[in-house]
Amino acid sequence: MNPIIQKSLNSLELGNLQVFKNMAIVPLYTPVEEEPEYLTLQEALDQQMLKITELDESGSVPELKVTNTSAQYVLLLDGEELMGAKQNRVLNTTILLKPNSETVIPVSCTEQGRWAYKSAEFSSSGHIMAQRIRSSKAKSVHSSLRQMRGHQSDQGEVWAEIHKLSTEAEVASPTGAMRDVYESKASHLADYEKTFEFIPKQQGILVMINGEVVGFDILSRASAYQKLHSKLIKSYAMDAMHQQTESHSTPSISKARAFLEATADCTAETYPSIGYGDDHRFEGKTMVGSALVANESVIHIAFFKKTENDTKDEMAGYRQRRQFRT
């Protein structure tokens, strides 16, 4: 693992365990906020310094065009959803846009049943894709990078996961929109937001569902994390709401520490970022992860527990390889 990333992970400070229903979180902190400074997606949109459109009039499902007219960097977080234009999309990877730049960004569709303009430009939906779908998407993007196909996702898998989420939530969206699921569960998600409020100087969260760690996100700056805290809570809560069981293990700080320590056992690969910096990708037996490093600072780190489908696919692949050798 890159020594800058390893140092960042080793320096993490864990806050007090918080529990609501079957979801538990551990606030994460780092000793020092690192440069560079940057705006979040919502801040840049609110200040009218960011313009996000289809690639051209006809559009391209896996790509969008972003124009940053500010003199500041702008952070687009993996899984953040953009709504409008010809169909809603989510970011395939975390991107730090350079000041005064125009960038083509890789995205996945989260609204399968629409391909017609609702607006000329995109806005933020206020949501981040559910953790379970972010995890499977991260694995497919890593696979695409290995095959030198860029930051592409498995779009069919994304649609299948959104359909599964809609079925679990008992939401029938006319366009198969992920956003419709979130909006229908707004009052339930608000309960999680009220319970897990932002704590001053907090820079990330580690989340457990049914007593087991499912992932964590951490940013280099508390001011940026604060703007994204609510989105991230809802992202993890969406899964927690639909994975409730009568019996589950007990969440603990020791499990949080064990998950963080296990990241060191992942294989690591580095690729050029879409914007500024380097995109680091990680994969282990039970987890996938990514980190954006720019200006020798870790801007964003996210690790997720692999989904059951990922594990089953890997086991099936292992059995096939074993049979082939016999």
Image (spheres, rainbow, N blue to C red):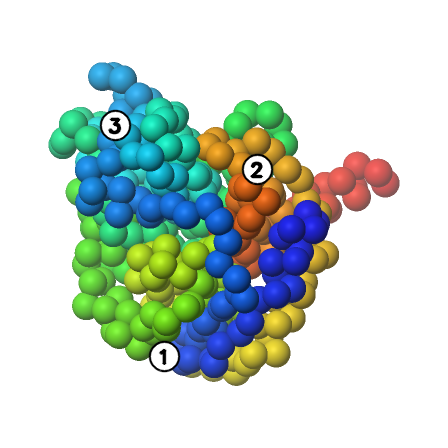
Residue type marked 1: Phe
In the image, which is nearer the foreground, mark 1 or mark 2?
A: 2
| Residue 322 occupies quadrant | top right
Q: Residue at x 85, y 40 (%)?
A: 326
Above/below status of 153 relative to 218? above
Q: Which residue in the protein does label 1 denote? A: 20
Q: Which mark is residue 310?
A: none
CA–CA distance in space, label 3 to label 1 = 39 Å
Q: Which residue is mark 3?
A: 53
Say which residue label 2 marks. 278
Q: Choose top left, top right, bottom left or bottom right for residue 111.
A: top left
For the point 31% across and 37% down, the residue is: 89
Q: CA distance from mark 2 to mark 3?
A: 25 Å
Going from N to C along the chain, the mark reached first, 3 or 1, is 1
Q: Viewer-proximal residue, 160 or 116?
A: 116
Tell me how far mark 1 sits from mark 2, CA to CA. 36 Å
Q: Amino acid at mark 3?
A: Thr
Sequence-earlier tag: 1 or 2:
1
Q: From the viewer's perspective, tell me whether residue 281 is left or right of residue 127.
A: right
Viewer-side label of 2, 3: 2
Count neighbours of disc 3 (C-alpha within 10 A) and say few if under 14, some if 14 to 19, many if 20 or more. Answer: many
Outermost residue to the right: 326
